[in-house]
Image (tube, rainbow, N blue to C red):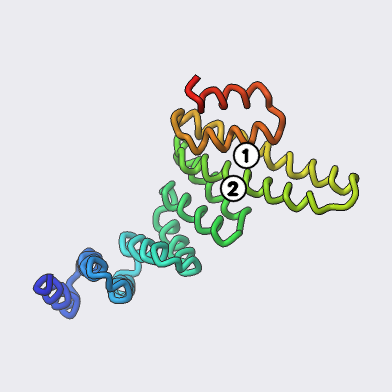
Amino acid sequence: KEKAKTYYNKLITMRYKEPKIYIFLGNLYKSESDSAKALSTIQTGRTAFPADNSLVIEELNMYLFSGKDKEALESLNLAIQGDPANANLHFAQGTVYDKVNKKDLAATSYKKAIELKPDYFDAYYNLGAMYFNEAAEMANKANDLKSNAEYGKAKEKFDARFKEAMPYLEKALELNPTDTNTMVSLKQLYARINETAKYEAIKNKLEGK
């Protein structure tokens, strides 16, 4: 490994025209748990090869791994500019927006991933789960309201959000009929919106009946 690092660094000093050497060297540092050196190596490569999307994605992965959401979004935007038809990049963008509580932007990214890849299970599941969690939070807040009229208005809103989650979670289950997390989410959802027949069906499926 030490010899490999020496030769990769020598190639970088020589300004060798191959973006992958930065990725190889960065991965060596990463394998030694030197994340700072790994990131700085990739950033040096990004400066040398600003149009190379593999370096953008490598930088993005390092930001995501280290929880640097702002920097990850910047890298994602660059990566998407270089490869706009890549459903995985739009999905990753959705997960980061979801994490930083930019739900509308997250939904847009998830829907773009689905548009590009109509059988994208994770995008359907994440979008459905995001809507479900939003609705559950709205319902919890509504419990603190004093008047029946206020609660009634709030219930209309959180019921609508629960129903918005339903087609995405149902599609996720269609794509992966054995996924337990999706079935549990749908069971809770059907209970919330009084879909009795669907609730019983998914309950039986979970219980193996």
Q: Amino acid at mark 2?
A: Met
Residue at the far left in the pictured view: 3
The relative height of residue 31 versus residue 114 in the rendered view (above or below) is below
Disc 1 packing (10 Å; few <14; some 14–19; many ≥20): many
- Residue 29, by quadrant, is bottom left
Residue at 22% x, 63% y is 20
Residue at image position (46%, 31%) is 175
Disc 2 + disc 1, Cβ < 8 Å:
yes
Q: Amino acid at mark 1?
A: Ala
Which percent across, then down, holds residue 92? 45, 53
Could you tell me which secondary element the residue under label 1 belongs to?
A: helix
| Label 2: which secondary element | helix
Rendering coords of residue 75 (x, y %)? 43, 65
Lower sequence index among marks 2 and 1? 2
The answer to whether 84 appears left or right of 36 in the picture is: right
- Circle 2 residue: 130
